Image (tube, rainbow, N blue to C red):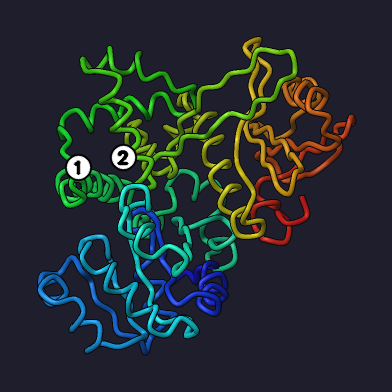
């Protein structure tokens, strides 16, 4: 089993809040993390009718019976639980680390968490496997393997490509046919699958709901609602633009990325590494993979950092712009192994316009070196393998 680096963050949050809510996509490893770290705690899965029924009928009595040190998986399945949990917590606000809630939908979709437990819970966003976790514990996996397979534990550790594709098919069907309805979302399964496939081919592109709606034969309101659902269940990321009044026309629409590269490759029909090597979406797939990894690492070492991108209507662009403590850190992402200064003109323009003294090009090679003008080419494999390396950027 690969030990997750989220354990330290979970322990720290439990010392400060009575409730910790761990959010992330289904099957990313949330349950395994808490069961391994909190072995003596009571674990209940509210997807199981036998666990859910006592809470649905009398949540107050059930909570008193179970006491503290309680893990509730898929807690959003029992909305009547949250007001009662609030009153139990308020009865002894000084006591920390009492409950851990797990969920596969964001607070924006599950309002009960954010409304009932405001000020009583802190959130920990968990992702599938990252490179810093894999490289420490699995010598048989390299960065390219993780990129191709994605980070969902079962898919990542599956050696057989056909069985991995079967896993993603089952994952997709379960999400569309069961999870969405359980969240109270009425969505056409056929249209959702079509949209998901279209998004795979638009991965890394500027989001245009009207164009997608026309292709699907539906309204752009419906398309936006579907994409919002995918975003709030941690499967799609809308990367927002950064813009300032610089006298230039700046793109103000978000970009759309798959958050897991393995799921992206499934929808692209990329079932073998050799297919990915020649696929036209290879560069954008790599870009999204590195962006997602960087954002996750920054959220741990700099929790308040905000991810964005920067692009002018003239075409100058920076793939990722992290804002932390008033400082902007620009990243350009390249699939080739030895980028040169002429390859990153957009980065140079961004740094000049925003008065940034240092920028980075993350590439697939093993060397790190200066390109001049404050720009450093850095190895993805070396930079993303430790939290310390990211904290120094």
- Rendered location of residue 75, percent (x, y): 27, 65
Q: Is label 1 in a helix, a strand or a loop?
A: loop
Disc 1 versus disc 2: distance between alpha carbons? 8 Å
Are there few (<14), some (14-19), or many (20+) residues within 10 Å of tag 1?
few
Q: Is residue 75 left or right of residue 232?
A: left
Image vertical order of residue 339 relative to residue 113, above or below: above
Question: Which residue ends up furthest to the top in the rendered image?
Answer: 314
Residue 33, numbered circle: none
* Residue pictured at 29% horizontal, 32% vertical: 225
- Rendered location of residue 196, percent (x, y): 30, 32
Q: Is residue 346 left or right of residue 173?
A: right
Q: Is label 2 in a helix, a strand or a loop?
A: helix
* Quarter holding residue 212: top left
Give the mark nearer the N terminus: 1 vs 2. Answer: 1
Q: What residue did someone put label 2 on?
A: 229
- Rendered location of residue 98, percent (x, y): 41, 82
Are there few (<14), some (14-19), or many (20+) residues within 10 Å of tag 2?
many
* Quarter holding residue 152: bottom left
Image vertical order of residue 79 relative to residue 339, above or below: below
* Quarter holding residue 22: bottom left
Report if the CB atoms under discs 1 and 2 are less than 8 Å apart.
Answer: yes
Image vertical order of residue 254 relative to residue 183, above or below: above
Question: Which residue ends up furthest to the right in the rendered image?
Answer: 372
- Rendered location of residue 293, percent (x, y): 56, 48
* Residue pictured at 66% horizontal, 22% vertical: 317
Q: Is residue 47 left or right of residue 148?
A: left
* Closest to the observer, 95 or 37: 95
* Residue pictured at 44% horizontal, 23% vertical: 207
Q: What residue did someone put label 1 on?
A: 185
């Amino acid at each position: 089993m690969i030990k997750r680096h989220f354990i330290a963050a979970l322990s720290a949050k439990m010392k400060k809040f009575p409730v910790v809510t761990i959010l992330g996509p289904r099957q990313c490893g949330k349950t395994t993390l808490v069961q391994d770290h909190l072995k003596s705690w009571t674990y209940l899965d509210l997807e199981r009718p036998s666990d859910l029924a006592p809470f649905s009928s009398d949540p107050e009595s059930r909570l008193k019976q179970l006491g503290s040190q309680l893990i509730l998986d898929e807690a959003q399945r029992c909305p009547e639980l949250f007001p009662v949990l609030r009153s139990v917590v308020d009865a002894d606000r000084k006591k920390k680390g009492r409950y851990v809630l797990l969920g596969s939908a964001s607070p924006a979709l599950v309002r009960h968490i954010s409304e009932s437990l405001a000020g009583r819970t802190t959130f920990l966003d968990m992702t599938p496997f990252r490179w810093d976790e894999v490289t420490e514990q699995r010598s048989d996996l390299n960065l390219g393997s993780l990129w191709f397979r994605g980070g969902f534990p079962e898919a990542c550790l599956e050696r057989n490509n056909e069985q991995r594709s079967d896993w993603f098919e089952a994952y997709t069907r379960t999400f569309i046919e069961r999870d969405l309805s359980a969240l109270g979302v009425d969505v056409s399964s056929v249209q959702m699958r079509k949209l998901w496939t279209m998004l795979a081919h638009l991965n890394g592109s500027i989001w245009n709901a009207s164009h997608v709606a026309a292709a699907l034969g539906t309204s752009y309101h419906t398309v936006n609602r579907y994409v919002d659902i995918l975003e709030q269940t941690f499967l799609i990321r809308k990367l927002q633009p950064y813009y300032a009044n610089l006298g230039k026309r700046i793109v103000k629409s978000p970009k759309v990325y798959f958050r897991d590269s393995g799921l992206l490759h499934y929808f692209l029909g990329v079932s073998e590494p050799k297919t990915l090597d020649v696929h036209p979406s290879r560069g954008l797939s790599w870009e999204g993979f590195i962006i997602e990894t960087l954002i996750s690492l920054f959220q741990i070492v700099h929790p308040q950092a905000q991810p964005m991108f920067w692009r002018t209507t003239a075409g100058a662009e920076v793939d990722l712009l992290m804002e932390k403590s008033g400082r902007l850190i620009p990243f350009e992402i390249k699939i080739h192994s030895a980028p040169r200064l002429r390859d990153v003109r957009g980065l140079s323009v961004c740094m000049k316009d925003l008065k940034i003294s240092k920028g980075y090009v993350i590439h697939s090679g093993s060397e790190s070196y200066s390109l001049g003008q404050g720009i450093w080419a850095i190895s993805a494999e070396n930079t993303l393998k430790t939290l310390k390396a990211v904290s120094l950027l």
